[in-house]
Image: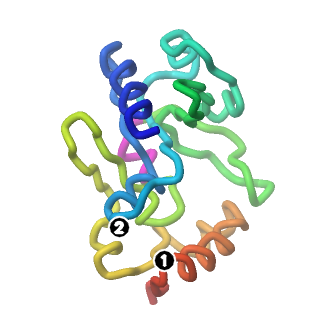
């Protein structure tokens, strides 16, 4: 799976786009655990992703997310985005395509907002996630109360991560 995820990044980069592994796979790699899946973020728009990669499913195209089927594996490939309002407490009312730093800052926890360039072997960390991994902390990005109101499932994710990773909550 890792090799195929690397190939997806290579295709996007060869076409002139930024592309990184994102979130849980980066967290797991830094914790010396085997990633269960590889999510990819990119500056490519959804229609560009569909045009570059052979087999795709527009599972969340309106949110910038395309499912790529490659080498017997599935990868969520998402365009860098920022979110605009969460009136239902679960999904953004609108998304704006943006750049890597804004995408990282819209995510739930610092330890899930890490990007990794598998070609240069560089970790991209806009929110202090590496430090929180070292300190074994679950920390919301920005105001925790606002993050939970955006998506109510985030509180359950915090509990799950605390228990699975044996981390502590940031005070």
Residue 79 screen position, x and y as percent: 50, 32
Residue most toward the right? 88
Q: Which residue corresponds to the image point at 48% horizontal and 84% vertical from the top-left?
A: 166
Neighbor class of circle 2 (other Cα within 10 Å; few <14, some 14-19, many 20+) is some
Q: Is residue 169 visible?
A: yes
Residue 92 screen position, x and y as percent: 68, 47
Horizontal relation, residue 57 to residue 38: left or right = right
| Observer-nearest of 105 and 29 | 29
Q: Could you say whether the residue bearing mark 2 is in a helix, strand or loop?
A: loop
Which color mode does the image show?
rainbow
Magenta stretch prevailing secondary structure: helix
Neighbor class of circle 1 (other Cα within 10 Å; few <14, some 14-19, many 20+) is some
Horizontal relation, residue 80 to residue 66: left or right = left
- As for residue 102 lying within the magenta part, the answer is yes
Dot 2 and dot 1 residues touching (CB under 8 Å): yes
Q: Could you say whether the residue bearing mark 1 is in a helix, strand or loop?
A: helix
Quadrant for the C terminus in the image: bottom left
**Which disc number belongs to residue 165?**
1
Q: Is residue 96 visible?
A: no
Q: Which residue corresponds to the image point at 58% horizontal and 29% vertical from the top-left?
A: 72
Q: Which residue corresponds to the image point at 67% horizontal and 39% vertical from the top-left?
A: 94
Per the image, the residue denoted by label 2 is 31
What's drawn in magenta, residue-wise? 99-104
| Observer-nearest of 157 and 64 | 157
- As for residue 14 lying within the magenta part, the answer is no
User: Quadrant of residue 139 in the image?
Assistant: bottom left
């Amino acid at each position: 799976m890792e090799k195929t995820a690397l190939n997806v990044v290579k295709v996007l980069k060869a076409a002139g786009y930024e592309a990184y592994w994102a979130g849980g796979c980066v967290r797991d790699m830094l914790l010396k655990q085997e990633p269960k899946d590889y999510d990819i973020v990119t500056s490519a728009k959804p229609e560009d992703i569909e045009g570059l990669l052979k087999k795709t499913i527009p599972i969340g195209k309106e949110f910038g997310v395309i499912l790529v089927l490659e080498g017997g594996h599935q990868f969520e490939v998402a365009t860098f985005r920022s979110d605009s309002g969460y009136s239902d407490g679960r999904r953004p009312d609108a998304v704006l395509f943006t750049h890597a730093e804004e995408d990282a800052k819209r995510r739930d926890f610092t330890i899930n907002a890490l990007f990794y360039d598998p070609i240069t072997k560089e970790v991209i960390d806009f929110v202090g996630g590496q430090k929180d991994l070292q300190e074994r902390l679950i920390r919301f990005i920005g105001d925790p109360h606002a993050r939970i109101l955006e998506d109510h499932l985030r509180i359950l994710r915090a509990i799950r991560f605390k228990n699975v990773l044996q981390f502590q909550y940031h005070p």
